[in-house]
Structures are given as structure tokens and as C-alpha cells.
Amino acid sequence: MVNYIKYGFRWLNHSKTREGISKTKLEIKKSPKRHEIINFLLSQFNCATNYLEIGVRNPDHNFNKIDADKKYSVDPGVEFKSNPVDFQLTSDAFFEQLEAQKILTPDTLFDVIFIDGLHLAEQVDRDISNAFKFIKPDGFVVLHDCNPPTEWHAREDYYFNMTPAKGHWNGTTWKAFVKWRSNPEVQSCCVDTDWGIGILSKSAAIGSSISISNDFFEYNTFANDRKHYLNLVDFEDLKGFLL
Ligand SMILES: C[S@@+](CC[C@H](N)C(=O)[O-])C[C@H]1O[C@@H](n2cnc3c(N)ncnc32)[C@H](O)[C@@H]1O
């Protein structure tokens, strides 16, 4: 028992734990929130807008705050049992059915697709590829959780939370976003708020592609130069790119 107390005290007092806790607090204080950025992007279109959200959890936290003419939601219901979405499916199953024209109309394209489902790089990479098949030529693919403040926030295991990030989890979404930032056909930036709002576009001048000198996607290499890897900007910069 005494050893557990000693261990717990050392854990709490460790510089990494203190760093994790203080960076979590800083991130939570940042504004604007994701729905404000998504609504700004939707406001750029002079037509009836069509929005898709992949990974919804409690819709009151984001989906219900989105101003679009049509909105669709996809979630298999892992984290929020009532799961009040249009499609109770994984993103893979949803895109498979959309491609096979089993759901929605055959000509369905979206102005903004918000990817916030399973935060593992391989899945996010696939979600981005699929999103680009169903985005309008001037549309935006938006990703949550692109800017993990510490490696503990960027852990692979969502369920293990005895870390300096505690229950906060950005997963390895950053790796998929950085990979897509190296695609010369894609423009991109990441708004430095709400855990990093990554934006990808095939037409808007929001940031040119980069060459990646981090072949193994090491977290510390990324973190030491995150402004470059993410094209980290603030909301005013984003408005300047688009207005
Ligand atoms: C971080 S939450 C989404 C939060 C929400 N977008 C918001 O802004 O408040 C992640 C959601 O992704 C869902 N999810 C997990 N695996 C998924 C998958 N393979 N495809 C789509 N969604 C998934 C979970 O059920 C969970 O509700």
C-alpha cells in the first residue's frame, strides 16, 4: 500500500505528467471550437450545402451545431449508446454502401465532410481517401484531433488512460493528415485550436504540399516542427486564405 501511494505521488509529480495535464488545460481553453470552423467553411458556398459527419458520439457536441441545408451522420455507436445518427455503420461500411449506390442518391456529393471516427492513422487515411470520392471539387475534408499536444495524447490505445493525457485521446490521426499534406494535389492547413482542425482541399489555396523528412512518423520529430508538418495557422489566417 505504501508503495502504491509512493508510486502514485511520483507519477503525479513527474514532469511528463505535469506537462500532459497543463497542455490538456491549454488546449481545452482554445477557441474557436470545431463547429465554428466548419460553419465558416460551409458559409463559403453560394448554394444549398450538404454536410457529412463521420463519428458523431453525442450530436449536441458538434453535429447539431452545424448550419447546413442537408446533414448526414455516421457512427457505429461505440461510445454513445443511443447513437441517434442517420447511418449506424462504421465509416468503411458507410462508404462501401454509398459507392454501391445502396444509400442516398447516386449523385450525392458533399461540401464539407468532417472525419472524427476511429482515430488510428490507417483508418483515418482510408476515411480521407473515401471522403475525396464524395466531396465536391471545391469542397473541404475536415479532420479533428490533428495536433496532439503530447505523445500520450497521440497513443494508439484509446482505452488505456493511466497516462499524462488521462482520458484525452487524439490517437494517430496526425500521421494520416501529415501523409496527405505531402500529396501535391492537395492544399492543406491545420487550425491551432480544439486539438487541431485539419483541412484538406483540392482547390482552395490554404497551404501547399510539403515533402516529409520523417519516414517513420516519429512523434518527437513531428512535435519539434509541428508548425511545418501541419501548416499550423490560426482562424484569422484561414479566413485570410479564403475571404
Ligand atoms: C471523438 S467521437 C466523435 C465526436 C464528435 N464528432 C464531436 O465533434 O463531438 C468518435 C466517434 O467515432 C465513432 N467511431 C468509432 N469507430 C468508428 C468507425 N470505424 N467509423 C465511424 N465512426 C467510428 C465512435 O463511436 C465515436 O462516437
Image (tube, rainbow, N blue to C red):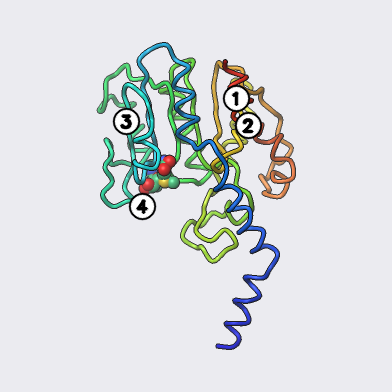
The residue at which mark 3 appears reads as 72
Circles 1, 2 touching at the beta carbon (< 8 Å): yes
Quadrant containing ligand 1 reads top left
Picture residue at 66% right of the left edge, 44% below the top? 217
Q: Is residue 219 or residue 65 the one in the foreground?
A: 65
Residue under numbered circle 4? 79
Single out the mark in the foreground, 3 or 1. 1
Q: On the image, numbered disc 2 is attached to which residue?
A: 234
Q: Position of residue 243 (x, y in %)?
A: 57, 15
On the image, which quarter does residue 194 sit in?
Answer: top right
Please state which of residues 106 and 4 is positioned toward the viewer in this rendering. 4
Q: Which residue is mark 1?
A: 238
Dot 4 beta carbon under 8 Å from ligand 1: yes
| Quadrant housing residue 206 | top right
Q: Nearer the viewer, mark 4 or mark 1?
A: 1
- Secondary structure type for disc 4: loop
Q: Amino acid at mark 2?
A: Asp
Question: Disc 4 versus disc 3: distance between alpha carbons?
Answer: 18 Å
* Residue occupying image coordinates x 54% and y 36%: 197
Which class describes the residues within 10 Å of circle 1: few (<14), some (14-19), or many (20+)? many
Kind of residue at badge 3: Tyr
Mark 2, mark 3: which one is toward the viewer? 2
